[in-house]
Image (spheres, rainbow, N blue to C red):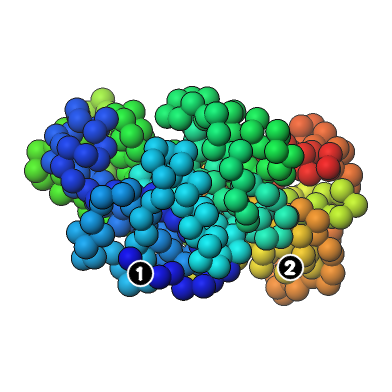
Amino acid sequence: MERLARQPRALGIMGKVPEVGQVKTRLSPPLTPEHAALLYTAFLRDAMLLGLSVPQCNVSVVLPEGNDERQLHDLAPAGVSFVQQPGNGLGEGLRGAIRLLLGHGAGSVALIGSDSPTLPEEHIEQAFDMLERDCADVVLGPAGDGGYYLIAVRADHPRLFEDITWSSELVMDQTLERAREANLRVKLIPEWYDIDDGASLHRLVADLGNDGHLAAPATRVALRTLRRLGAELPESPVPWTVLSTETPYRDRRRSLVQELLLTHCGDEAAYSYLDAPDAVWIVPVTTQGEIVLIRQYRHPVRDWVLEVPAGGLDGDSMHAAAVKELREEVGGTGGSVSYVGAFYSSSGQMTLRALVFVALGVELGESELESTELLEPVIVPAGLAFDMARRGEINDGQSALAVLFCEHAIRAWLAK
């Protein structure tokens, strides 16, 4: 086995050699064992590519004893190492992988599965940030089935893997209980999912069909290949067919799209909407527990609107864009900036998706406004901001929803 480089962060991908009949067996049916193995191969490839996108992180695939890494050399991109999983069973394997990676000099270790091809890079970065900046002992990424898709630590905590009913809906709750018993400080990142049955496969197909911002390049190719091979895959949920498309107007921020559609009823219909790229909304919370809003003039409504800082990605990652907008609009620096969730801004009128971040413990400074921006900060206690959002006094709907998206995380932070 290749010796790992000594780096401060280590990401372990719990994987297997994709042998037919040995991987993703719960996907057969609807897939054949051969098709399931082909799809898992793509999952593993995407997991490795995802790991390499995390800054300053050593990436390893952790294989069960007896798996021959040489079968994966052609699959693995440069920079990925292979290590043998110490211990038998899931619990021993997870703990053994953590001890192994820590023993190679990592200051913090995160483990993920190899079957979450759409997992955002930001979730992994957030986990490392919580370990390093927030001094968490354990970070968990909850899965919808009651387990977790990620665990990250800075030290070996054997109690986390003891007395757990593995492969059940009790895993997350029992792990949290073991952490409490060991007096460990736990942080959670947003929920995600893995692909292990027909329902989650259906969700994967739907997500990749509807969201061009999810990566998973190998998985996308594998799904197209499986369709050509006649695999029984869920259909994409898009019920209308585009017959023709025109774009009569386009600028840096948006395009006007005019389409002729064939609807689910078999009728033709004209539809116009704005095609606008994703943007970030940031809810800043000061060290004093106040939320920073901005009062900004908005020409389309000829009115002053109460909002939170927001802006486009402009080629940056969504986390980098959030940090930049926070600094430019309210001079916000420091603290932790974490992804909370996303929503469509106005799904019947435009494609814009709002990516919501919360910034906790922000220090305010001088703004760096563009010449066309006319705004001023409005600082209010967090509890009052939540009430204002509910009463419509934060009269930009996207900003009001962003504030309420972040309410749980802000209240938990203030309660510490």
Q: Is residue 123 left or right of residue 51?
A: right
| Residue highlighted by disc 1 | 2
Query: Pointer 1: residues within 10 angstroms few (<14), some, or many (20+)?
Result: few
Q: Secondary structure at mark 1?
A: loop
Nearer to us in this view, 405 or 191: 191
Identify which residue is drawn at 45% across, 25% down: 168
From the image, which quarter does the C terminus lie in?
top right
Amino acid at circle 1? Glu
Q: Position of residue 64 (x, y in %)?
A: 33, 48
From the image, which quarter does the N terminus lie in?
bottom left
Labels 1 and 2 touching (C-beta < 8 A): no
Q: Of the residues under marks 1 and 2, which one precedes in the sequence?
A: 1
Identify which residue is drawn at 10% across, 45% down: 228
Q: Is residue 288 left or right of residue 210?
A: right
Vertical comparison of 72 with 28: above or below:
below
Q: Position of residue 273 (x, y in %)?
A: 44, 47
Q: Is residue 144 left or right of residue 136?
A: left
The label shown at residue 327 is 2
Q: Secondary structure at mark 2?
A: helix
Vertical comparison of 220 with 271: above or below:
below
Q: Residue furthest left?
A: 229
- Residue 2 position by quadrant: bottom left
